[in-house]
Image (cartoon, helix red, strand yellow):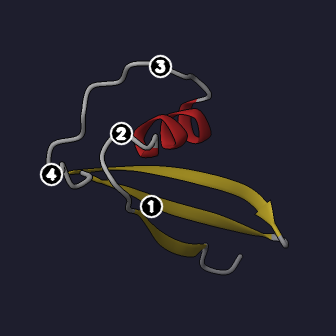
Amino acid sequence: MSEPLFLKIIVVGDSGVGKTSFLNRYIYGNFNKVPNPTIGCDFSMKVISNFEGKSLRLQLWDIAGKYS
């Protein structure tokens, strides 16, 4: 079997636009209307099996937004 594909995805944007909510929904399948703000950055991993016959590893980074 060949090496899994690896992608690092960085999600950026202003504070309060829903970056953390979007990632939590995609990775864990849950949605929190009022999540705690991200301080600095956070990252999570998700593995997608059988992506064009290979395994795809996603490293998803959630970067804190800029406060105005």
Q: Position of residue 66 (x, y in %)?
A: 21, 55
Q: Position of residue 4 (x, y in %)?
A: 61, 73
Question: Quick one: SS at disc 1?
Answer: strand
Q: What residue is disc 4 on?
A: 40
Residue nearest the viewer, comparing 54 with 10: 10
Q: Tell me the tag on residue 59.
A: 1
Q: Tell me the tag on residue 17.
A: none
Q: CA distance from mark 3 to mark 1?
A: 21 Å
| Three-letter residue code for mark 2 | Gly
Q: What residue is disc 2 on?
A: 16
Q: Is residue 25 above or below residue 43?
A: above
Q: CA distance from mark 3 to mark 2?
A: 13 Å
Q: Earlier in the sequence, mark 3 or mark 1?
A: 3
Q: CA distance from mark 3 to mark 4?
A: 20 Å
Q: Can you tell which of label 1 and label 2 is closer to the viewer? A: 2
- Most extreme residue toward the top is 33
- How crowded pointer 4 is (Cα within 10 Å; few <14, some 14-19, many 20+) is rated as few
In the image, taking residue 28 as reference, residue 48 lies left or right, namely right
Q: What residue is disc 3 on?
A: 32
- How crowded pointer 3 is (Cα within 10 Å; few <14, some 14-19, many 20+) is rated as few
Question: Quick one: SS at disc 4?
Answer: loop
Question: Quick one: SS at disc 2?
Answer: loop
| Three-letter residue code for mark 1 | Gln
Q: CA distance from mark 2 to mark 4?
A: 14 Å
